[in-house]
Amino acid sequence: MPGSGFATIDGQRHRSMYNEELMSQETIRDIERAIRTLTPQEVEELYAWLDQHYPQAIDSRLASDLGLGRLDKAIQRALDDEEKGRTKLL
């Protein structure tokens, strides 16, 4: 992955996958302006595209843990709790 840092989008600080040297503040502002013009449907499509092409680290870790069976016991406990009525709707 390219370097990591942070970018400010709409006044909030977000993790960025790019070093500041690679993406100028003007480029970031251009992207922010373009995103603000998107319809809600287009925003959802953008999220889906970003998630597919640039998954967050937590997604990769979760996929790895699931694939290696590291969460099997916790999943089974949760399913057992639900089956035995030890859960409640939020």
Image: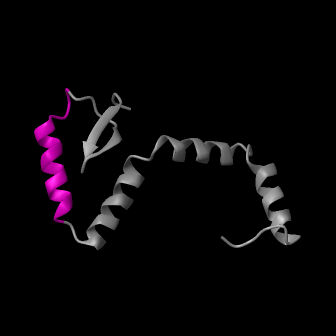
Q: Please, is residue 8 above or below residue 36 in the view?
A: above
Residue 63 drawn at (x, y percent): 59, 47
Q: Is residue 23 magenta?
A: yes
Q: Out of 68 and 17, give the one closest to the viewer.
A: 17
Q: Please, is residue 41 above or below residue 50 in the view?
A: below
Q: Residue at x 20, y 30 (%)?
A: 22
Q: Is residue 70 magenta?
A: no
- For the magenta stretch, what is the residue range? 21-37
- Quadrant housing the N terminus: top left
Residue 50 drawn at (x, y percent): 35, 53
Q: Please, is residue 20 above or below residue 56 in the view?
A: above
- The image's colouring method is one colour
How many numbered marks, from 0 up?
0
Q: Out of 5 and 45, give the one closest to the viewer.
A: 5
- Quadrant housing the C terminus: bottom right
Q: Out of 10 and 30, give the one closest to the viewer.
A: 10
Residue 65 drawn at (x, y percent): 66, 43
Tell whether 32 sits left or right of 72.
Answer: left
Question: Which quadrant holds residue 81?
Answer: bottom right
Q: Out of 89 and 37, give the one closest to the viewer.
A: 89
Q: Residue at x 32, y 41 (%)?
A: 13
Judged by its main secondary structure, the magenta piece is helix
Q: Residue at x 27, y 29 (%)?
A: 19
Q: Residue at x 73, y 48 (%)?
A: 71
Q: Residue furthest right?
A: 84
Tell whether 54 sits left or right of 89.
Answer: left
Tell whether 64 sits left or right of 2.
Answer: right
